[in-house]
Image (spheres, rainbow, N blue to C red):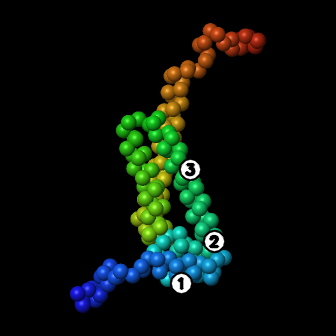
Amino acid sequence: FAGIGALGFGRMASTANTRGEAWMTLLQQGLDNPILGTGMENAVRSENGYLFGFASFGLGMVLLILILMAVSGFLSLQLLTKRRLLPREYRSLADFLLAYQVVYFAGSVFEGYMMARVASNLSFFIIFSTMAVFLVRIADSYGMAAAEQEFGDGYDDPELDYGEDLPPEPA
């Protein structure tokens, strides 16, 4: 096993808590430079996207990440509550999009891909978020159509007297 370190497997074979050390390093870098951060080149490790953002760009990036999480959470909550209004063939897509949102933010705890300028996860996040917006709109349109079918528009209800107080329309 002497050559295991030479092959690049030394970290995997080690029992040291390297992730915890990386998190502490990133946190310390962020606390040392809380306003502007150290810059991406100077942030030592990218083992956590949230801490990497804080270490690289300071509290402003933390605020942007929190806003992104809030907007994404709101969209996910909308999709989750309106999922039942979707046609059956769209529901599995809605489940996939909801799961991706969870995986994206949960995975950022262990990897720094949230801060990458070019990463497939970022591209997928943008594409899948856009798809989720369209599914919410589709659910809204199906929900409105179902409500009209169930309750009608009220104009053909004899109990309601629409327009009786209005003068006749000119010819």
Assess disc 1: are there few (<14), some (14-19) or many (≥20) residues with their C-alpha within 10 Å of its C-alpha: few
Q: Which residue is mark 1?
A: 42
The answer to whether any part of residue 127 appears in the image is no
Q: Secondary structure at mark 3?
A: helix
* Marks 2 and 3, how far apart at CA: 22 Å
Q: Which residue appears at 30% of the width and 81% of the height?
A: 13
Q: Amino acid at mark 1?
A: Asn
Query: x and y percent of residue 104 in the render?
Result: 45, 60
- The residue under label 3 is 74
Q: Residue at x 75, y 13 (%)?
A: 166
Which circle marks residue 59 in the picture?
2
Other-residue count near label 3 (Cα within 10 Å), few / some / many at <14 / 14–19 / ≥20? few
- The answer to whether one can see residue 98 in this image is yes
Question: Closer to the N terminus: mark 2 or mark 3?
Answer: 2
Q: Against 133, is 20 above or below?
A: below
- Horizontal relation, residue 90 to residue 7: left or right: right
Q: Secondary structure at mark 2?
A: helix
Q: Nearer the viewer, residue 59 or 40?
A: 59
Looking at the image, is mark 3 or mark 1 earlier in the sequence? 1
Q: Residue 6: image x %, image y %?
A: 28, 89
- Numbered disc in front, either 2 or 1: 2
| Contact? badges 3 and 1 (CB < 8 Å) | no
Query: From mark 3 to mark 1, how far is it between C-alphas?
Result: 34 Å
Three-letter residue code for mark 2: Leu
The residue lying at 43 percent from left, 59 percent from top is 103
Three-letter amino acid code at disc 3? Phe
* Residue contact between numbered discs 2 and 1, judged by CB atoms under 8 Å: no
